[in-house]
Amino acid sequence: MARTSFLGDLVSNLYGLSRWPLGGDRRSIEDLCRALLSSAGEVAGLRLAASIFGRYQQMTTEEKFAFFTFLNEELDVDAAKVAGLAQAYSEDPSTENFSALVRAAEPRRQELFRRLHEVPEATAALVAARLDLLDMLRDHPELKRTDMDLVHLLRSWFNRGFLTIQQIDWNTSATLLEKVVAYEAVHEIHDWDDLRRRLHPADRRCFAFFHPAMPDEPLIFVEVALTKGVPGSIQGLLADEREALAAEEANTAVFYSISNCQKGLRGISFGNFLIKQVVTELSQELPGLNTFVTLSPMPGLNRWLETLEGDPKAARLLDGEASETEAEALAARYLLEARRPDGFPRDPVARFHLGNGAIVHDVHAGADISENGMAQSSGMMVNYLYDRSQTEKNHEAFTGEKKIAASRGVRGKVRSERGASQAAAPVPETTD
């Protein structure tokens, strides 16, 4: 499916930037921001905000960097003033001193973002601007202060209470279906026939979160397969010629792809809310469902295997010569024992699902033999099980004590791998 023209139209139409004025006020964008912060009139403020967005649309990357530097430096907090007000509040915790301290402790750029946000369609434009900012952070980490302020506001504006869930099916508008194709981040959708196989059969579902300020833009979506039993490969789940199952006959819901759609909202999590909401929706629709699992990738497995110098089983798995038993034991060890310096799992998908209260249920060799699946995990995949009676307890144990909940089968595979190689190298606690 052609994506270039679609994405080009998406960028130009999504944010409504062409509707904002580009002429008129000849002041610099910095002077426009100063004027907006000092403006008391609502109409004048909206006009200034629209002019700022229109000007930003036309800026080069270098000009945008200068703009973010202005936000970062000139609109930062006055640390000396805050220190003095904090001392005054410590000596006299009056309402007046508290109010003065709170006002001074908030960077002026936060108020600027709030005033910019009052313009129609500004929400999506600020999300797009943050994507520009994220690109700059790699070379200019000092801009992180501005990013932190923007994230603080975005988390409020994208609070779960504002989000709506919508089922996407084959009758959904072609425009939205094109976006599902473009945003799919786990298992590429190759063409319309491939998309139809994921949406049209009775045993397939897709749900997405939307925000009222961006009604035509999914924030995140999850693809679901209804099955009998827990699947062990994505090939079988997405096979062209598979026989569809009547939804009422299914006993298992499989979350096999979760895609975040807005890169400018990176770090603002919706997935945990979406999974819980979809479990509720499916349970109401199909009371016969009693198992909720994922079929998930292990994106960091091969990079971890490469660190196990001198481990012959790791070398065999990377070379495609490991037995199924060896492969699954190494994958289980990776999920349960490979940690970052902060003690949490090295694997990002594991951190997400375990943080939601799921357990590591099973691992499968040869589960994703696509080019990407082989490159990142030597074809391995994992099921995370969501047991609604245990998710809260598992979540607390994971976030508070970094304990990983896993099935006996998975723990047994780790013990067998250890027993077969007493001299196995210790698991390095490194970051990806």
Image (cartoon, rainbow, N blue to C red):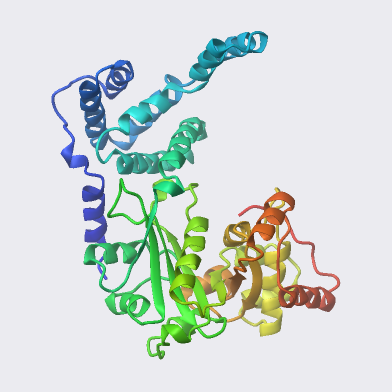
Q: Is 144 situated above or below 367?
A: above
Name the one closer to the observer, 339 or 289. Answer: 289
Q: Is residue 79 left or right of residue 207?
A: right
Name the one closer to the observer, 88 or 344. Answer: 88
Q: Position of residue 11 (x, y in %)?
A: 26, 50
Q: Is 268 situated above or below 405?
A: above
Name the one closer to the observer, 39 or 330. Answer: 39
Q: Position of residue 301 (x, y in %)?
A: 62, 66
Q: Which quarter of the image is occupied by the N terminus?
A: bottom left
Q: Say which residue appears at 75% left-offset and 61% top-offset.
A: 427
Q: Is 109 situated above or below 261?
A: above
Name the one closer to the observer, 389 or 170. Answer: 389
Q: Say which residue appears at 28% left-offset and 66% top-offset.
A: 177
Q: Is residue 67 visible?
A: no
Quadrant in the rendering for residue 62: top left
Q: Is residue 424 visible?
A: yes
Q: Is residue 82 left or right of residue 36?
A: right
Numbered label tally? 0
Q: Position of residue 356 (x, y in %)?
A: 59, 58
Q: Say which residue appears at 34% left-offset and 33% top-offset.
A: 64
Q: Which quarter of the image is occupied by the C terminus?
A: bottom right
Q: Is residue 144 left or right of residue 343?
A: left
Quadrant in the rendering for residue 208: bottom left
Q: Is 141 situated above or below 216?
A: above
Q: Is residue 207 left or right of residue 324?
A: left
> Residue most toward the left?
24
Q: Say which residue appears at 71% left-offset and 74% top-offset.
A: 410
Q: Position of residue 110 (x, y in %)?
A: 42, 27
